[in-house]
Image: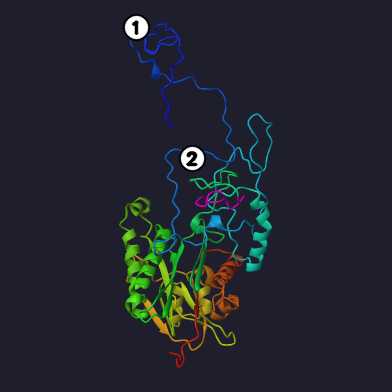
Amino acid sequence: MSQMPQQAAVRKCPSCEEPLEPGDRFCGACGYDLSVVPARPEDSPTLVVNGAVPAPDGVDWPVARDSDGHGRPAPVHAAAELPGTDSGGSPLPPPPPPPAPPGAPESAAPGVRFDRPDEPDEYPLQAPDPRLTAEQEAVAQDAAAPAQAAHAEPAAAEKVCVACRAGRVDDDGYCENCGHAQPRERDHMEQESGPIAAVSDRGLRHHRNEDAFSVGCTALPDGAPASVAIVCDGVSSATRPDDASLAASRAAGESLLGALPRGTHPQQAMHDAILAASHAVNALADEPATAREQAPHQNAPACTLVGAVVTAGLLVVGWVGDSRVYWVPADRSTPPARLTEDDSWAAQMVAAGLMNEAEAYADERAHAITGWLGADAYELEPHTASFKPDRPGLVVVCTDGLWNYAESAEEMADAVPLDAAARPLHGARVLVGHALDGGGHDNVTVALLPFPAPPQGAGSA
């Protein structure tokens, strides 16, 4: 709010030392404008309550990006809309009482902070915990309902604090009620689209989530449904890996969902989508933000990509890098399979016959990738493959943040819940939880696409 200049309460003119009369706005001797004299500062300290420490001038707070490749807000379940439970599934304590009116005795009320240390890159609270089962989530929500009902709900467009579930989140990402720093939107993302779902989590060791995904459904020219999932993993040693994965997943998802209804063969559409993703990542290298952040020893923005398209009787996969696609049949008595081959040092050693798979992946160079999307990629070689499964099953599309904890097809099948095809979002949460329970050393992203029973007369490829 603008304020007029206050009259200076001074006895002598600051310019010529001529005595002044009360109420003078100009010096009678030299004409000095007394309104520009700063008012005497008040000697009363200001206490900052509720952790609402004003942001320093000039701080450029990051804006959370969405994760949908089609211009719609995503993920469907933003962090601020998730149930208020702790990592063990128990409801969070009720929010603290409102601050006492002015003049009331001061008390150390819970949730009120008069100081706030620098916030770490890793936030202690991540929500939701994907290791919770659906039943635990329902119990936690029911238990938290009375505490939530006791407080007025903020406006629908406002974000609610994930800690106290009552305070409004300000533009700086802090709760105005309890002062808790909110998880960044990409720290944990979930999205459902028709029969498919995807979940991405920052993990337990990284300071940000450099994975991204795009999922969607469309129809072929004959009206048959088609499901699409793209998962990208930013290359941490490159500049702006999080932007690279987001740009690639959006571009590939949009390309596929635009090409399939026009009658493009799914395998050709996947190839074109990878090229579109590559162009999107290459474009980041020319942006001013990259020039500001890029140091001489860093590479251009880069990421890996893996994707799948499911139509009636046909499964198409495409990839560049070391993210993977697994096939898990609905009949668990039949063998699962890995449908992609890594662009990595370990895979090259195995293919050349120089090491067996166990030896290669035990080497410290195992995860050095030999293929990626980015302006400094040696040569882009999109890999695509088509399959015609003869039975229903589940397609698992994931980054190495998951398959590091379930590397073989059999291990991945064991980690997938039996009802994952019917409840893909729950299944994706369980798989992310499996990686977090294993240590969560990397960002974790997984998309699940149920494969329907093939049409009559369809056979295996």
Q: Earlier in the sequence, mark 1 or mark 2?
A: 1
Residue at numbered disc 2: 55
Query: Residue 159 lies in magenta, yes or no?
Result: yes
| Residues shaded magenta | 154-165
* Three-letter code, disc 1: Ala
The Cα–Cα distance between marks 1 and 2, rounded to whole angstroms, is 44 Å
Can residue 375 be spotted in the picture? no
Q: Please report the residue visible at 64 percent of the width from the left and 64 percent of the height from the top.
A: 138
Quarter holding the N terminus? top left
Is 74 above or below relative to 112?
below
Query: Residue 401 lies in magenta, yes or no?
Result: no
* Three-letter code, disc 2: Ala
Residue 359, percent from left and from top: 52, 77
Residue 139, percent from left and from top: 67, 63
Q: Which mark is residue 29?
A: 1
SS at mark 1 in the image = loop
SS at mark 2 in the image = loop
Our reading of the magenta stretch's main secondary structure is loop
Looking at the image, the residue that sits furthest to the bottom is 457
Can residue 434 be spotted in the picture? yes
Quarter holding the C terminus? bottom left
Residue 404, percent from left and from top: 54, 71
Q: Please report the residue visible at 51 percent of the width from the left and 54 percent of the height from the top.
A: 184
Is 115 above or below relative to 346?
above
Circle 1 residues within 10 Å: few <14, some 14–19, many ≥20? few
Circle 2 residues within 10 Å: few <14, some 14–19, many ≥20? few
Q: Please report the residue visible at 33 percent of the width from the left and 53 percent of the height from the top.
A: 291
178 displayed left or right of 70: right
80 displayed left or right of 58: right
